[in-house]
Each structure stands twice: as C-alpha cells, then as structure tokens.
Image (cartoon, rainbow, N blue to C red):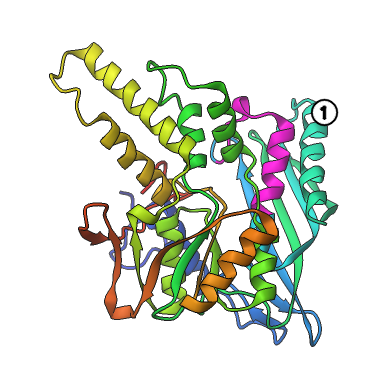
C-alpha cells in the first residue's frame, strides 16, 4: 500500500473502502462544528430534526442513488425508478413519525440519456410523492458518466411526537411492520441467482421485483405510531434488520434479543429462496454428482432468514415499546393501515449483549451484517 502524503509519520494511505460506510460517517461527523441552537438532532438518526416553531419541527433527509450501485439501469423502468427515489426518502420521514412536504432533486446524467427517460422518471417520482402529500419544488442538473439521482426531502412533525432511535429501554418489545426479505429476493432474481433452476412463477417474480424496485414507504404507519405515543425508538429497515436494530442499540445504549421463528419472512421470499437453492443444486449437479439431495428446504429457509436479517431495503419500520403500549400500537397500526405488526424480540440491558435465538433454541450473536455502500457485497 502506498504511503500517503500528509498521512502522518509511518502512516499508510487509508482508503474509504478500508473504513466502510459507518466508520467513515463517524470520521466525518467528528469534523463538524457545533450545531446551531435550532438543531434538535443532527447526525445519527433517520433525519435531522430542526426546530420550526415552539410546537413544530422540521425533518430533513437526503438519499443518493447511483446507477450500477443502487439499481441496475437495464433492469428497471424509469417510472419505477422514480417511484423508488421518492419511496426511500419518504421512508425516512415515516421512521420519525412525520409528514413529508417538499422534495428537491439533483441529477447528474450522461449527455446521451433520452429525454423521455427523465420524463418517465419524474412521472413516477411525482406520483409517489403526491400519494403522501409531498411535492417536488426544485433541484439541479449536471453531467456524469453514470446516472446519479440525489433527493432532499423536507418534512414536519409535532414537537414531542418525533420518534428517535435513542429511546429504547430494557424490557421493551421489538416490533416490525409488514414482511421481511422480499427486496433481497427481488435482487436475487435480477442477479440471476435462480437461473438454471425451476421457473419462477410470474406473480411471485413481479411482487418481489416491485418490493425491491419500488418499496412501499410506511409513512402512514409511522404517523399512527407517532400520534398514539408509546413508541420509545424507531428506524426504517434500509441496511438490513440486524444492522438497523444495531443502530437502535447504539443510539439507546441497550442490548437486544431477536427470535428467528418470530421473523415475518415473506412467503414470496421463501419461494424465491427455494428456487435459488434448486438452481444452486442443479449447477452443482451439472458440475458432478454430489450424492446429496437432502436438506434443500432447510437450506432455503436458512437463506430466506439471512435475507430477512441482512438483505436490506425492505423499508419496513422497526420500533420498540413497553409491552402494554406495544400491544396497543400493533393493533392500532393494523386497524388504521392494514399493515401487520409482529413482535420479534425484546430489548436487553447493555451488558445483555445482542443475540439471535435460532429456531432450534441456540442463542448466537446477532451479527450486524448488511449493506455497506463502500464495499461490493453484503458484510
């Protein structure tokens, strides 16, 4: 490794890929100055929180999408891509219990991009933003070799109703909305992981591709949770359940125990995992008989659980609450929105550690694996 100019005596060049995403964020955060008096929450949550008035707070977030990193441009329609851009930012506002208001969109586009592509991208973006009461009020355009889309979203929430990552307490229950793993199942199909095996049913393919390419932001669910009160912490599942629960633990200074059998793994995810395992077995058989055909469904179930824990981009809400409040929140969210809520574990004291109870009862460390934008594969 080359020595860096100004790297320090005896130092070697430190690359961002050596740090990884979250250590890099911590490194940059250490170089920021003191916040202004109107900043309630800076770095470290789903959005920044800035005081608007005595009884209202601004929620501020942004997210970047880069062709070939966050999406495969040849595998997604521009309209669906626009919906995705809106959804992943709306999800951050939902995770704070807020209401989305205004988008700014910055584009860096290859000069030979068809204008109709951007027309359709904005059509999808405006459609999804509008469904949740937000609009697009401006932005910027530049050129780049690959398509880059950066969205800024301003939202609001009543002061005292914001739900941060930092309030989880020992004894709280851990809950998630919806189902887990479908986004990673969709990515598996796009990456060809099921190629060479049995055909994927068309309806299953479309549902998991939609889950990956245009997730449903849980804004309404977040608003119900915020208005009812009782939730002690909340986050949206973008990096993967294990990683994102770890963010709550870090911010709250607690441990956690999750139960594998309680994870609401999507049925389509199980189906795709089985097809991926069948395709893998077929490829191995083509390379030479292995003499083993057993364990296929066990392997598929294990794969689906891995996707639920570390696949990322499900954009469900994970939140914590005391047991009595948890029961009320789960019932009200499902009644108001139709979205199921599942208890998947409990919060432990910090010395309790972070654990996953396997289906066979074994307790194993909860590895905070998930997507890292500065590395090429899931950790």
Using residue 229 as the reference point, say whether residue 286 is left or right of it.
left
Residue depicted at 29% across the width and 17% down the height: 282
Residue at x 34%, y 80% (from the top left corner): 349
Closer to the camera in the image, 50 or 128: 128
Decide if residue 273 is on the left or right side of residue 299: right
116 over 88 or under it: above or below: above
- Please, is residue 90 above or below residue 281 in the view? below
Q: How many marks?
A: 1
- In reply to whether residue 172 is colored magenta, the answer given is no
Q: Image point 53% across, 29% down: which residue?
A: 204
Q: Position of residue 369 (x, y in %)?
A: 36, 53
| Local crowd size for mark 1, using a 10 Å CA cut-off: few (<14), some (14–19), many (≥20) | few
Up the image or down, 173 lies above or below 374; here it is below
- State the residue in front, 212 or 45: 212
Residue carrying label 1: 115
Question: What are the residue bounds of the magenta stretch?
Answer: 70-89
Task: State the residue in front, 306 or 174.
Answer: 174
């Amino acid at each position: 490794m080359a020595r860096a100019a100004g790297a320090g005596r005896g130092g070697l060049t430190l690359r961002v890929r050596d740090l990884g995403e979250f250590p890099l964020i911590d490194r940059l955060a250490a170089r920021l100055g003191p916040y202004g008096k109107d900043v309630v929450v800076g770095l470290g949550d789903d959005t920044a929180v800035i005081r608007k008035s005595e009884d209202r707070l601004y929620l501020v977030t942004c997210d970047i999408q880069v062709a070939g990193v966050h999406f495969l441009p040849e595998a997604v329609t521009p309209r669906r891509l626009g919906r995705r851009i809106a959804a992943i930012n709306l999800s951050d506002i939902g995770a704070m219990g807020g209401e989305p208001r205004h988008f700014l969109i910055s584009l860096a586009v290859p000069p030979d991009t068809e204008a109709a592509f951007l027309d359709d991208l904005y059509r999808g973006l405006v459609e999804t933003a509008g469904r949740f009461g937000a609009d697009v009020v401006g932005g910027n355009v530049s050129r780049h070799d690959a398509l880059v889309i950066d969205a800024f979203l301003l939202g609001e929430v009543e002061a005292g109703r914001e739900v941060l990552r930092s309030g989880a307490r020992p004894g709280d229950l851990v809950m998630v909305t919806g189902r887990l793993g479908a986004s990673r199942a969709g990515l598996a199909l796009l990456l060809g992981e099921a190629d060479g095996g049995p055909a994927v049913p068309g309806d299953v393919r479309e549902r998991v591709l939609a889950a990956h390419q245009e997730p449903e932001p849980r804004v309404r669910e977040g608003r119900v949770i915020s208005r009812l009160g009782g939730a002690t912490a909340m986050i949206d599942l973008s990096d993967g359940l294990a990683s994102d629960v770890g963010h709550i633990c870090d911010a709250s200074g607690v441990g956690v125990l999750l139960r594998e059998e309680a994870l609401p793994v999507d049925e389509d995810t199980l189906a795709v995992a089985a097809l991926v395992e069948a395709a893998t077995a077929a490829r191995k058989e083509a390379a030479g008989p292995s003499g083993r055909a057993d364990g296929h469904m066990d392997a598929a179930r294990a794969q689906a659980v891995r996707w639920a824990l570390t696949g990322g981009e499900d954009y469900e809400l994970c939140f914590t609450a005391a047991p009595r409040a948890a029961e009320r929140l789960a019932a009200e969210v499902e009644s108001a929105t139709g979205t199921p809520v599942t208890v998947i574990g409990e919060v432990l004291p910090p010395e309790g550690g972070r654990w996953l109870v396997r289906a066979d009862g074994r307790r194993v460390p909860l590895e905070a694996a998930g997507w890292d934008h500065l590395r090429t594969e899931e950790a």
